[in-house]
Each structure stands twice: as structure tokens, then as C-alpha cells.
Image (spheres, grey):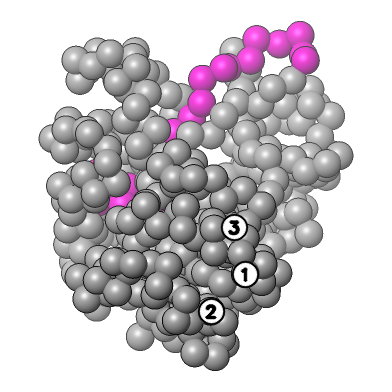
Amino acid sequence: MQTSITRQQTDFIKRKLKNTPAVALLGPRQVGKSTLAKEIMKSFKGAIYLDLERPTDLNKLRDPEAYFALHPNKLICLDEIQRSPELFPVLRSLIDERGRNGQFLILGSASPTLIQQRSESLAGRMAYIEMMPFLLQELIAHKQTSTLLRRLWLRGGFPRSYLATNDKASFEWRLDFIRTFLERDLTQLSFSLSPKVMERFWRLCAHSHGQLLNQSKLGSTLGLSHHTIRSYIDALEQTFILRSLPPYEANLKKRLIKSPKVYIRDTGLLHALLGLETQEDFFSHPCYGSSWEGLVIEQILAQLPDWRASFYRTASGSEIDLIVEKGKRRIAVECKASTAPEVGKGFWLALQNLEITEAWVVAPVNERYPLGRGVSVIPLEQIKKIGG
């Protein structure tokens, strides 16, 4: 069922493999990396898949150089690479020795920074690609339904959560994911953090979703130091669970907010952490607007992976939810969960202060329409127009 939904990055990864010795596909567990890898491997004759969590496959790599020598011209996929960081020096040697593209497809549940910290650098030899849960564009291409957006928003984009038979089954899957992540995944990724304290911290982040990060307040609530709180944030960021959106930096005569904003990256996990199982629970909850904001930001940044992202807020109240920049282009995005969105004076002042002439308001509306002064309201389904 999951393989019938074509992932947006499929062709991009194939091109990377044809032009790069190795590609690392990274993302949280259960996001569909293995399914996508097996689909991609069909385009490479004789490609080999090894799951490093399976003892039989791990045994084959007792002497990795000898095993790889048996398959010198084949694409080899190594799943759950973080389980065997000792392979990286071998991969580097083989990549340099063979000098051809498309040698290895590596899958992992950790960020490029984490893998590089635990292994020998493969800079210039490996392309790192982040894989997210289902994107709205992927689901629309598969099947257009009137309830598709609401379903993605409530359940999030993890395949087993989104494709569950009903909301209850989806909710229970997400609770199991959270439990497994805390009790097993963090340990396997060598994070020496208390699962119980991390759970409390994660839930506090859910209640602070879309708000400014206050490390002192979090530390006081949990009885932890500023440095410990920073390590918890880093762990959730490096495992693709949390996004810390930095404030916009500008040489303005304004008092700018300097703290980042925090988001649980998958709205399904956010709602599970807050105990929101159904649409009814969700609509009446204070997180309704901030949940939409997080969904929009993740969907946009997936479309613009090489753009710089930040938010803008001044002490006087001028604010923009998201600013994306690339080269000389600078685009403002405001996120409104209403079907009749309105923006306040602070948004217009921010556009004026930053001299931004291209801006969008993303809302659950049916069609695009102008709002004034270079600003358009746009459905989430049309976010490809942003940056286009």
C-alpha cells in the first residue's frame, strides 16, 4: 500500500547516484527510507540490499572489504548505517579506489552532522539527502480527495500513521513510535539521555510548539542545566524530530527577538504528544493555529531545501512567520489556519521594514487570490509557486 505513493525525491536520488559515488538518505525511523530505497534499486541492475539490523546481513560484512570485492560493479544499499559506524573508513577507501559513481546508497536515522561526528569524513564523496514523512504534493499526485489535507494535518506524514485504517489506529501507532523512540532509538544512536526526562522535555516542546525557545524556563521546569537542555534540543534536532527556526538577522534600528522558535516537525507526533486523537479534539485545542504554522513551514522547506529559513519578530510586535532567502530573493510567508485569513498591522509593518515585495499567506482555502501590496493568499496545495 505504501509503495503506491511515489515519493518526490525518487528521481532526484537516482540522478545523484549517477553523478556521485555515494548517497546518504537520512530521516527518522519509519519514514519510508527502506521502501524508497528498494524502489530506486530496481533501476540499478543487480543492486544489493543489506539491513544492518539483521544478523544474517551483518554477518556478511564481517570482512567488508572481501564482501564488497565480490560485487565491484553493483550498487550496494546499507540500511541503518548508524549501527556500524566502523564501515565508514572502508567505504571511503573503496570509493576512492574504484572512482566510479553509484557505488553505495546509505540509509540512516541520524543527521549528517551526527554521522560525520561518529565516522571518517566522506566530504566530496557522498551526497546527503533528508527524507521527510509524506508531503502533501506526493499525496495529491497519488489521489485527490477533499479530506486529504485534514487527514495529513491530523495524522502527520509517517506512512503507517497516515495510511492507518482509522484515526484511533493512527493515534495508537504514533504513541508506539514515541515509546520506541524514547526507549530504544535514542540509545541505539548513542544518546546517553534519560528516556523519562526526554519524554517530559518532548511534551514540553509540544506545548511550546511555534513559540520562542526559553531554555531557562525549560531547565527550571525539569531541574536541568542550560547545557543539558541544549543537548536535549540537539538530540531531537539531529534525529529530525524537532526544528529550531532561527530569528532573522538584519541591521535595522529595531529591537529584534533573538531566541529561536521550536516546532515538532511532524504534526501527527505533535498531536499525539498533546493527546489529540480526533478532528474534534484538534479543532478545539489552543495549538490549532500553531499546528497549521508548523505544517506549512515543513511543507515549504521540503520544497526549498537549499534556501535559508528564519522568522522575523520585533519587540514592538511586527512579525513574519517564515522568511526564505536564496541569493537576492527574499520571500515572506504568513501561516493562517482560517479559511478567511486576515493579517494584522504587524505583518504589513514587517514587510515595510524589511523592504520585502514578495509575500504569501498560506491558508486552508480553495484557490489563490490577491490580498494587496504584493501579497497573495494561497492554498497549501499550491506552495510550489513559492520560490518558483
- Mark 1 is on which residue type? Arg
Q: Which residue is mark 1?
A: 98
As measured in the structure, the alpha-carbon distance from the residue carrying label 3 to the one carrying label 1 is 14 Å
Q: What residue is disc 2 on?
A: 72
* Marked residue nearer the N-terminal end (3 or 1): 1
For the residues labelled 1 and 2, say whether their Cβ atoms are less than 8 Å apart.
Answer: yes
Q: Position of residue 88 (x, y in %)?
A: 45, 54
Q: Is residue 142 above or below residue 252?
A: below
Residue 344 visible to the viewer = no
Q: Quadrant of the N terminus?
A: bottom left
Identify the residue at horizontal 64%, vertical 39% (top origin): 309
Of 333 and 162, nearer the camera is 162
Image spot of residue 239 (x, y percent): 38, 46
- Nearest the viewer among 271 and 80 is 80
User: Quick one: label 1 or label 2, which is nearer the N terminus?
Assistant: 2
Q: Is residue 132 above or below residue 121?
A: below
Disc assigned to residue 3: none
Question: Would you say 193 lies left or right of 21 here?
Answer: left
Please identify the quarter of the rendering in which residue 238 is found: top left
Residue stretch rendered in magenta on the structure: 251-274
Q: Label 3 belongs to which residue?
A: 126
Q: Is residue 153 magenta?
A: no
Counting from the top left corner in percent of width and height, residue 198 is at 22, 34
At 84% from the left and 29% from the top, the residue drawn is 355
Q: Residues within 10 Å of mark 3 (few under 14, many from 20)?
A: many
